[in-house]
Image: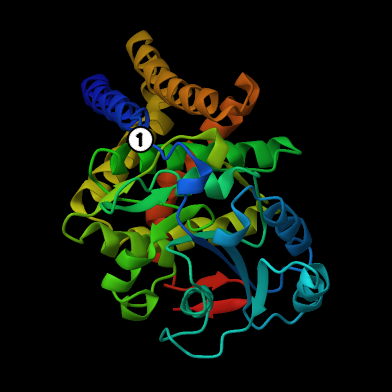
Amino acid sequence: MFEVIFAIAVFLYFTQIAVFLIGANKRYERLGDDANLPSASVIVAARNEEENILACVRSLDKLEYPEDKLEIIIVDDFSEDATHEIVTDFIKDKPRFKLITPQETLVERPGKANALANGIKRSKGEIILTTDADCEVTPTWAKTLASYYVNEKISFVGGFTAQTRASLFEAMQSLDFIFLLGVASGTMNLGQSLSCIGNNMSFRRKAYDKVGGYEAIPFSVTEDFALVTKIAELPESENIYPVDKNALVRSKACKTVRDIYWQKKRWGTGGLASKFAGYFIMGLGFLTNLLLLVSPFFFSSEVLTIAFFKILSDYLFLHSLHKKLGESFSFGEFLVFEIYYVLYVVMLPFVLAFTPRRIKWKAREYR
């Protein structure tokens, strides 16, 4: 009986992975000339980022974009370290940059959403791009995302984020990021805006204004997902998530298992606001990984074969995404990722159900 249930779950899981790949492989028209690029504003919310902010602004300073069409706004979200001073010193002779602090409480609770809302309110670009202070962007990042806004229907364009890979621990997290964003890309490109990542996304100002901005969105610890969900509900709106290596961003990986715990708990809490399709994907992933986890207790040649196909599905999915993004990974890294992935996918629902609804994020606590 276990073999039958496991086989059905893996068949559905494999089918789902195939659907994700179909969506992720969709191609989109792009503006062919830099002269046709729309005006753009890059917004970066930074809080206590003295270790990371210099690398971030240096990468932003190298952006290839028409000078008169790009502004870069760093929002110092009341940092208690040297973040403000580091940015001030770096941008003093760089007119494309602005450094501001949130002057208004536009969102019901202090935090990143309020910082972003203040930055957007002070910006002028037709397209808004966001990344995080612990990220480094490629020189082609902004113009690549902006080039997908070929008509007024395009309201959101997402990008992929990989992570630093100085160790096996970091490589495991990078594979996880790309896996999850592959799901986000595959579903969004097929008409279901189920996820995104705030450190690499863009949206049209008109769409942002139509939904009322962050100010009109109920508080969420995943403010990026909440905003994209609202934009997707606009009539005649099209959200797209191309797999494009020229729009790749690299972020700092979590340093400890404890940091990963709070990251996953925050993402999982935000995911509770998902649509039915999101719950179906999460539910099937939970069931399939749970069955894989307990499969040694029902060991047989059939169970081993079914488990192999589940693991093969994950490998092929990640291999395809990494190839398109120009990223490499080893089979050893994949095996470590698979163990990590199975464990946290199974554990996360129990964490959300049986621990206090409390999130720690950027030295702030939310309930």
Question: What residue appears at the point 52 percent right and 79 percent down from the top-left corner?
Answer: 122
Towards the viewer: 178 or 326: 326
The residue that label 1 is drawn on is 29
Please tell me how crowded label 1 is: few (under 14), some (14-19), or many (20+) other residues with Cα within 10 Å: few
Residue 258, x across and y down, in percent: 63, 58
Q: Is residue 332 above or below residue 356?
A: above
Q: Is residue 300 visible?
A: yes
Query: In the image, is residue 244 above or below residue 84?
Result: above
Front in this rendered view, residue 47 or 256: 47
| Image quarter hosting the C terminus | bottom left
| Picture coordinates of residue 176, whole percent (x, y) | 52, 40
* Residue closest to the eye, 35 or 45: 35
Q: Who's the residue at 35% across and 30% down the image?
A: 27
Residue drawn at x 60%, y 31% is 336
Residue 160 visible in the current orientation: no
Q: Residue furthest front?
A: 35
Q: Residue furthest top?
A: 301
